[in-house]
Image: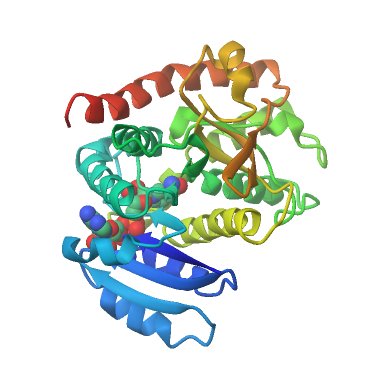
Amino acid sequence: MVKVVVCGAAGGIGQPLSLLLKQSSLISHLALYDIVNAAGVASDLSHINTASKVTGHVGKDSLAEALTGAHTVVIPAGVPRKPGMTRDDLFKVNASIVRDLAQACAQYCPTAFILVISNPVNSTVPIVCEVLKKAKVFDPRRVFGVTTLDVVRSSTFVHQIKPQFEPHSNRITVVGGHSGATIVPVLSQVKQVRFSDEEIKTLTHRIQYGGDEVVKAKDGAGSATLSMAYAGARFTNSLLEASVGGKRGLVESTYVHLIGNPGAEWNVQATGGLQYFAQDVELGPQGVAQVKALPDLSVEEKKLVEIAIGELKGNIAKGVSFITEGG
Ligand code: NAI
């Protein structure tokens, strides 16, 4: 039983994510941190009859109290997209929010798992890792970019055109990153159903730009929150089951620091040595137990991965230099 902290807990994602985590029997203490309203959210959730304790922490001065003793810190803090914005447009605001939270983690819970939801994930994960490197507490097995929503969308969208594909238990690997063209669903490896070339093309595009459907429908009121909370809770629960629940063989696609992680040697050949990449990862007691080898890719998927690598290079460099060049 462990302490889990949600940073940005009063937000559109933070609230339903905290609600879902309140239902976990592996969490003994759910600490909700935000710059506003976390006390109210915590009071509300604390009336739910599960065993975990819920505490609310508002403002920077309460960060130490929120983070101390944390086993896992989930970060959905920051601004979401509005119509017409890309995830990269969020960098200006979210980069410093994530940097400050990572610095606080380095100070108050240096061995915690850090799960980054705040966009642009392709750059915010490098920011967290660089902050931890600077503080000399970095362990590549313990930092994750949460790309689970791309995986969840993949199963859902496939099921919508192939009803015989059961969406809840069938997982589709999604590699690359978490923005538009960097999202590469590996549909060629789906064994349960067959697709035409046209179906693959349409599905791939929909998965890559699924977030835009929600941004457009919300019409200025934000981006995916409920499906993201579901996806964030799924990833958090998988990590808790593997790290404290003793479950073996749990695999999730997630964006990690490849270099230094067990099993990621394929990366030199496959990506030209990219520092960060989303891929299937087996989770274990220390976080990443093993980064799986890239699955076999179709000719089309190989082309998409090439495009993703090109874009990721810039996204990663932007995150890294934000810290190394004193952002
Ligand atoms: P929101 O605006 O509803 O909530 C954000 C929360 O963060 C607010 O409560 C705000 O007070 C809080 N916050 C701002 N600065 C903070 C700080 N310094 N410390 C702690 N909390 C702080 O936004 P929403 O919709 O919850 O989205 C949050 C982030 O998640 C956005 O960056 C969004 O782009 C990202 N996102 C990521 C997805 C993914 O798949 N990884 C999917 C959807 C959204």
Ligand 1 positioned in quadrant: bottom left
Given residues 69 and 72, the one toward you in this image is: 69
Relative to residue 205, is residue 40 drawn left or right? left
Residue 270's place in the image compared with 31, above or below, is above
The residue lying at 21 percent from left, 68 percent from top is 36
Residue 21's place in the image compared with 135, above or below, is below
The residue lying at 35 percent from left, 26 percent from top is 315
Numbered label tally? 0
**Residue 316 seen in this snapshot:** yes
Name of the residue lying farthest toward the front: 136
The residue lying at 62 percent from left, 19 percent from top is 265
Residue 313's place in the image compared with 257, above or below, is above
Relative to residue 54, is residue 327 drawn left or right? left
Q: Could you say where residue 152 lies in the image, as x and y percent from the top left?
A: 59, 50
Given residues 69 and 125, the one toward you in this image is: 69
**Residue 11 seen in this snapshot:** no
Q: Could you say where residue 94 lies in the image, as x and y percent from the top left?
A: 25, 44
Given residues 203 and 42, the one toward you in this image is: 42
Q: Quadrant of the C terminus?
A: top left
The residue lying at 74 percent from left, 46 percent from top is 249
Q: Could you say where residue 48 lies in the image, as x and y percent from the top left?
A: 48, 85
Relative to residue 190, is residue 218 drawn left or right? left
Q: Quadrant of the N terminus?
A: bottom right
